[in-house]
Image: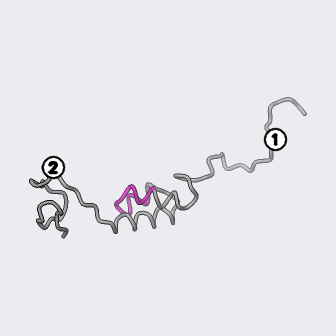
């Protein structure tokens, strides 16, 4: 349980806070840390977010891995021989 900082009521999730005049949502910080750890370990923001519960944590963990979201290798998987194969015959 958390305590709403506006109305001081004990809440378990999102609630309609009369003092704030809006719906207040509190995200558990442990979800962020868990998602970041999973995102970093798998190099996958989506897996980190789904397994840990926080999309921001999943993205942060993935970015910490190699600086890009997803795999850094966007090629076909074939080794690069340096040949541009422009058909020039040289």
Residue 35, numbered label:
none
Depth check: give the residue in front, 32 or 80. 32
- Does 8 appear in magenta? no
Name the residue that disc number 2 marks. Answer: 22
Q: Secondary structure at mark 1?
A: loop
Establish if 88 lies above or below 6. above
Label 1, residues with CA under 10 Å away: few <14, some 14-19, many ≥20: few
User: How has the structure been colored for display?
Assistant: one colour
Task: Please tell me whether mark 2 or mark 1 is closer to you in this view.
Answer: 2
* Left-right relation of 52 to 37: left
Q: For the point 41% across and 60% down, which residue is it?
A: 57
Magenta range is 47-59
Depth check: give the residue in front, 77 or 67. 67
Query: Which image quadrant for residue 86?
Result: top right
Distance Cα–Cα, label 2 vs label 1: 60 Å
- Does 58 appear in magenta? yes
The location of residue 65, given as percent across then percent down, is: 55, 61
Q: For the point 17% across and 65% down, which residue is it?
A: 12
């Amino acid at each position: 349980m958390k305590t709403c900082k506006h109305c001081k009521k004990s809440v378990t999730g999102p609630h309609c806070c009369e003092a704030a005049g809006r719906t207040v949502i509190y995200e558990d910080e442990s979800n962020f840390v868990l998602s970041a750890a999973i995102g970093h370990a798998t190099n996958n923001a989506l897996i980190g977010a789904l397994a840990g519960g926080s999309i921001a944590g999943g993205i942060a963990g993935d970015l910490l891995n190699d600086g890009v979201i997803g795999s850094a290798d966007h090629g076909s998987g074939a080794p690069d021989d340096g040949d541009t194969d422009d058909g020039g015959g040289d």
